[in-house]
Amino acid sequence: MRRVLPAIHPAPLPRVPRSGLVRAINLPDGSLFPCLGLGTWRLGESAAQRAADIAAVRQALEIGYRLIDTAEMYGDGGAERVVGEALNQAFRAGPVRREDTVIVTKVLPTNASRKGVVAACERSLTRLGIDHIDVFLLHWRGRHPLAETVAGFEALRSRGLIRAWGVSNFDVDDIEELWSVADGDRCVVNQVYYSASKRGIEFDLLPAQRARRLATMAYCPIDQGALAEEAVFAQVGRRHGVSAAQAALAWVLRQPDVAAIPKASRESHLRDNFAAVHIALTPLDLAAIDERFRPPTRKQPLAMT
Ligand SMILES: NC(=O)c1ccc[n+]([C@@H]2O[C@H](COP(=O)([O-])OP(=O)(O)OC[C@H]3O[C@@H](n4cnc5c(N)ncnc54)[C@H](OP(=O)(O)O)[C@@H]3O)[C@@H](O)[C@H]2O)c1
């Protein structure tokens, strides 16, 4: 029988409307987040690029992106500052509203002690210029015991500084360990490397997450741009009148509990990726992709960047 997880306190994630623009992922507490978001790795790394980086995030918000993924690590806080400035401009200009946006950021493992998590969150909030983070992730496992990190996350949640928390780069054994610590089962998402060319999680991690009703957020869904050059996706894309990158993204998004956070700076990429949520791949497409990228038949090490 499926276990019903306790409701997220103090407030659920924004109920992003099923507007037909972007499908939503259901979280265990009944709240939703969009299945497509914007990645921001490599943004905020250089002063010379700052204005262009802010413009790219603003453009994404104008197109309709309402989920933004960032991290304290990216550009040493620079990506969070870029996101913060873009949000600030978008909220002032309208019609983008804070309550319709889902901001995901990550704490570095070195900061993941009980107190460190709280301090890192406060620094991220300052850089982002917002009063709460929607989903706060542990970027990857480090030396701090999971029980401490979870206690820090829960302290943040009860103060209303985060709405929900999750993890990243966790394999099955990490998830099992997480579920064994107090409140570990309040985790709402695991963000992992997942694309057609890196599909090892289908063997064990995805089923393990499904059994726990834990959502999956796919990073590098077009394999850092490589799948945009992949012949099988070009062929599938031609059948649908879309690009190879869009077909690769549609492949990740074919599963209702998997979200994807492609990073794009170019407007054409931002628009193409946003439109990819409407592409429905056929059994013929899926068979061709399976032929090129075989589904895993045994345990594979978790892919990481
Ligand atoms: N949790 C983790 O450990 C972790 C690790 C890595 C990444 N992430 C997150 O996941 C996000 C996505 O991963 P990623 O940035 O490494 O890789 P990605 O999203 O798979 O690929 C990004 C690259 O693909 C290009 N691209 C995007 N859309 C395209 C399109 N429609 N056609 C052709 N090329 C396209 C981009 O170019 P342009 O920029 O020129 O448009 C960029 O060079 C990151 O930004 C970050 O937020 C998390």
Image (cartoon, rainbow, N blue to C red):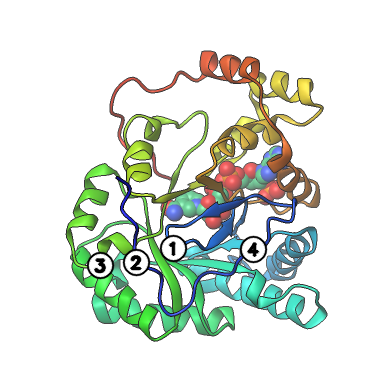
Of callouts 3 and 1, the N-terminal one: 1
- Does label 4 or label 2 sit earlier along the sequence? 2
Vertical relation: 204 (above or below) 161? above
Tell me, yes or no, whether the two marked residues, 2 and 3, touch with CB atoms within 8 Å. no
SS at mark 3 in the image? loop
In terms of secondary structure, where does tag 1 sit?
Answer: loop
CA gap between label 1 and label 4 equals 14 Å
* Identity, as a three-letter code, of the amino acid under mark 4: Val
Residue at which label 3 appears? 183
Disc 4 is placed on an element classified as loop
Provide the residue designation for mark 1: 29
**Disc 3 + disc 1, Cβ < 8 Å:** no
- Is the residue marked by circle 1 packed among few (<14), some (14-19), or many (20+) residues within 10 Å? some
Label 2 sits on what residue type?
A: Pro
Looking at the picture, tell me which residue is in the foreground, 229 or 13. 13
Q: Is residue 216 left or right of residue 94?
A: left
Residue 238 in sight from this viewpoint: yes
Q: Say whether marks 3 and 4 touch (CB < 8 Å).
A: no
Callout 1 touching callout 2 (CB < 8 Å): yes
The answer for how far apart the CA atoms under marks 1 and 2 are is: 7 Å
* Left/right of residue 88 with respect to residue 145 in the rendered view: right
Closer to the chain start, of discs 2 and 3, is 2
The residue lying at 18 percent from left, 63 percent from top is 181
Q: CA distance from mark 4 to mark 2?
A: 20 Å
User: What separation in Å lies between label 3 and label 4 (alpha carbons)?
Assistant: 26 Å
